[in-house]
Image: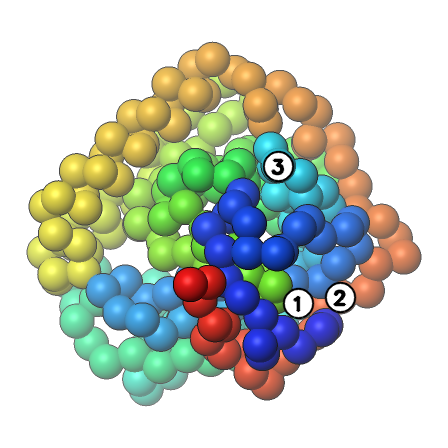
Amino acid sequence: MTDPDTADRAREGGGGGGGHWPPGAQILWRYRENAGERFHICRPVTVVEDTAELLAVWLAPGTECVKPVLADGTPVHLEPLATRYTKPRAVQRDRWFGTGVLKLARPGDPWSVWLFWEQGWRFKNWYVNLEQPRERWAGGVDSEDHFLDICVYEDRSWSWRDEDEFAEAQRAGLMDAGQAGRVREAGRRAVAHIAEWGAPFADGWQDWRPDPTWTIPSLPDNWDRTPAHVS
């Protein structure tokens, strides 16, 4: 993976001299901690497609990633919800388990759409991850997760996910009322988009398969570097 320590940063879909990544390029997909500036999630991915309309990337099984944990190493999901967002945290390197994930993101959308498969490439579902529109830099894209998500199924039904975490994050002060309202509105927009059943749900991505010649991207030591901002 190319080391972009001196790379400029630009709003996704904008300029900054970035251009587009070619298929097979290896980049980082990162999330900042909520109500903070540090990165606490980093996933090396391979670019499937990068155009003015869509960024598609593949998170391969077995990829070394960075994830948040409690300061004592306890997995976040094992901590009771009432204290999940108040106890001190650290980050930990780990491997992406299970099948891989195809992530699709349109410039400016406050969500990305993920595709999940069961073993044997049996399609499972789409997952609409509500998040800050991604900031683009030479080494990848950065965002902030907004807790609330939507599962979407092949029969076009859908359901909200993680509403309890969304509510608890507000109680813990990780999201104020104004931001929570904007996230809810983004969710309603996403639901309207699902009802239209346009891109990416009708585009056949569930039949996509990764190039067998691709190697698994490595996690660089400076995965949490801060790129220079475009002035």
Give the Cα distance between marks 1 and 3.
27 Å
Point out the tag, 2 or 1, that comes first from the N-terminus: 1
Q: Which residue is mark 2?
A: 216
Mark sitting earlier along the chain (1/3)? 3
Residue drawn 12% across and 52% down?
176
Chosen colour scheme = rainbow
Q: Quadrant of residue 182?
A: top left
**Of labels 2 and 3, the one closer to you:** 3
Q: Amino acid at mark 3?
A: Ala
Horizontal arrangement in the rendering, residue 218 relative to residue 72 (left or right): right
Circle nearer the N terminus (2, 3): 3
Residue picked out by circle 3? 52
Residue 63 has which mark? 1
Q: Is residue 110 left or right of residue 54?
A: left
For marks 1 and 3, give the one nearer the viewer. Answer: 3
Q: Nearer the viewer, residue 50 or 175?
A: 50
| Residue 194 percent across, percent down from the top left | 45, 21
Nearer to us in this view, 48 or 230: 230
Q: Quadrant of residue 63?
A: bottom right
- Residue, x 78% and y 49% (percent of image)? 23
Between the residue at mark 2 and the residue at mark 1, the CA separation in whole angstroms equals: 6 Å
